[in-house]
Image (tube, grey):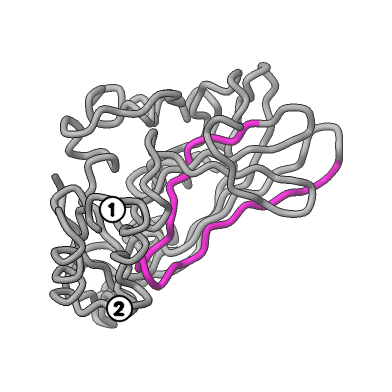
Amino acid sequence: MRKKGWKLMLRAGPLLLLLLVGTGLNAHAFLGLGNSVSWKEEVQLHDGRKIIVERSQTHGGRHELGQPLPIKDHSVTFSLPGAGKTITWEDKYSQDIGVANFKMLALHIANNTSYIITAPVGCLAYNKWGRPNPPYVIFRYDGKGWQRIQLAELPVEFKEMNLAIDTFNDERKLLAEGLVSAEMIKKLNSSYSKYPNIRSEYQTILRTPSETGKNSASNVDCEVMIPNGRNGWAGFDVSSIHSYGECMQVCKFHNLSKEFCPCDDLLKTKPEWR
């Protein structure tokens, strides 16, 4: 099972910026030097229709020394077919995560209602968003704004991932295309089919939970963590705690205040602890 902890994070220094001056926008974007980039994608909907969406992303946030800056925030903008209304979904930098919260997987539309299917980026985001299994966080546009919904509320006719998924590693290819065809999106996303036991949730929209313990690169095997109230996280695997006293000891070990220690709430649902 993966354990996530943040090391010392630093931005690329000014010397690196000077060395890269004149290499062009695409090189800057790929190396993640904090600028915003955008491109368009042809998205094939479940009913065969195709729409053009505009996507953008900015690099920044926490990262390991010497590594490219991750995606700090990103968005998708599109027009609702036949309605003439422009809609934007965006995911902004989250201080408790240190980067953006989500990876976009799909955009689907039915009966003039739009849905965005995402996956949390890493274990911190997965814990923050309630450890869903299958590991999706889904949003529906209600005419005024985006609201999170449960997987059971997503129309069953939606099956395909139709947005470019790995926009970090594929950024140069996406920018080079300008307008990325639906066929190109399928080709880029097909890389996940090489690892069916690891990223099956990226190949098609799963409707049943993924088995844990066998998906080391999948969010479903992330260590259980809770926020510590100091923009950090503490490991808190309830399955290994057998009494209220043990629970309180874990809170004490992680220096969790009463506000963030979950033991009193857990006590309400665990009569064996009383």
Tell me the residue that label 2 is attached to. 18
Which region shows up in magenta? 84-108
- Determine whether 141 is above or below 163 in the image: below
Is residue 137 at least partly visible in the picture? yes
Q: Residue at x 43, y 47 (%)?
A: 103
- Determine whether 106 is above or below 139 in the image: above
Q: Residue at x 58, y 56 (%)?
A: 90
Tell whether 259 sits left or right of 225.
right
x, y (%) of residue 254?
Answer: 18, 74
Q: Secondary structure at mark 2?
A: helix
x, y (%) of residue 86?
Answer: 77, 48
Tell me the residue that label 1 is attached to. 123
Q: Residue at x 44, y 39 (%)?
A: 136
- Give the residue type at disc 1: Cys
Q: Residue at x 42, y 64 (%)?
A: 72
Of the two numbered discs 2 and 1 on the same chain, state the one appearing first in sequence.
2
In this rendered view, identify the residue nearer to me: 120 or 223: 223
In this rendered view, identify the residue nearer to me: 110 or 208: 208
Q: Is residue 10 part of the magenta span, yes or no?
A: no
Number of numbered markers = 2
Q: Is residue 93 part of the magenta span, yes or no?
A: yes
**Residue neighbourhood size for the residue with mark 1, other residues' Cα within 10 Å, grouped as few (<14), some (14–19), many (≥20):** many
